[in-house]
Amino acid sequence: MDAELFPRTRTRIAPGAVHVPDWLDAGAQRELLEACREWARPPAGLRTVRTPGGGTMSVRQVCLGRHWYPYGYARTAVDGDGAPVKPFPALLGDLGRRAVADALGRRADAAYDIALINFYDGDARMGMHRDSDEKSDAPVVSLSLGDTCVFRFGNTATRGRPYTDVELRSGDLFVFGGPSRFAHHGVPRVHAGTAPPGLGLTGRLNITLRVGGL
């Protein structure tokens, strides 16, 4: 949106959880999108995630550094083509350190080494869940590209209320750590067709950076 009555400002959603609008400028968004397209190519590329119960997630995913599958990590795409996972790139390590400094006002305690990149089409959703398969409690860094979504940020005890719905647009940053590190969160809705016209992306990409501690 070119002009808004009330400009978006950084917001503390919960203790340790901060939303920073427009953190990535247009050039940085395009650079990150092109990198994501390369990472999504086979081998160990974009795949459909299957749950232990036999279902499938509506988002598609590619992993860097370590391969996530429900509910653990591996060095190969064990539920995909079996190829070795692509290495975690320096570009994302730099973004992770900057994100923690800008959002939380402190240096990252450990180096980011895992990325989960989720692609949402207009019908994709993400149920409420916790990022709890890591051995580290370092903050999670989440970057958005493309379509706007409703990001539901909840509590550490249950998948239900209380929660806060946050609008995440292309270029936005969301960081959660400390007391909110293991809060439930999800994406109940994606607003199709809302990506910046100049970006060249149909759908939404979410790049989540984590410290594995593995």
Image (cartoon, rainbow, N blue to C red):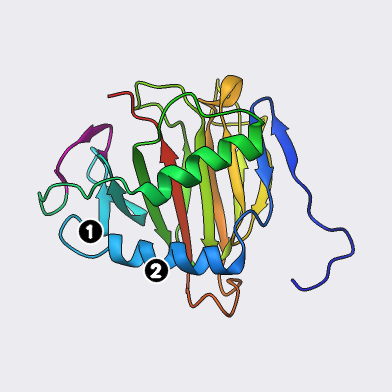
Residue 123 appears in view: no
Q: Which mark is residue 34?
A: 2
Q: Quadrant of residue 133?
A: top left
Question: For the magenta stretch, what is the residue range?
Answer: 68-79
Residue 199 appears in view: yes
Between circles 2 and 1, the one closer to the viewer is 2
Circle 1 sits on which residue? 45
Q: Nearer the viewer, residue 35 or 14?
A: 35
Identify the residue at horizontal 79%, vertical 49% (top origin): 9
Q: Nearer the viewer, residue 9 or 191?
A: 9
Residue 146 in picture, x, y percent from top left: 53, 66
Is 126 left or right of 147, judged from the image as shown? left
- Circle 1 SS class: loop
Amino acid type at mark 2: Glu
- The residue carrying pointer 2 sits among few (fewer than 14), some (14 to 19) or many (20 or more) residues within 10 Å by Cα, namely few
Residue 93 in picture, x, y percent from top left: 42, 43
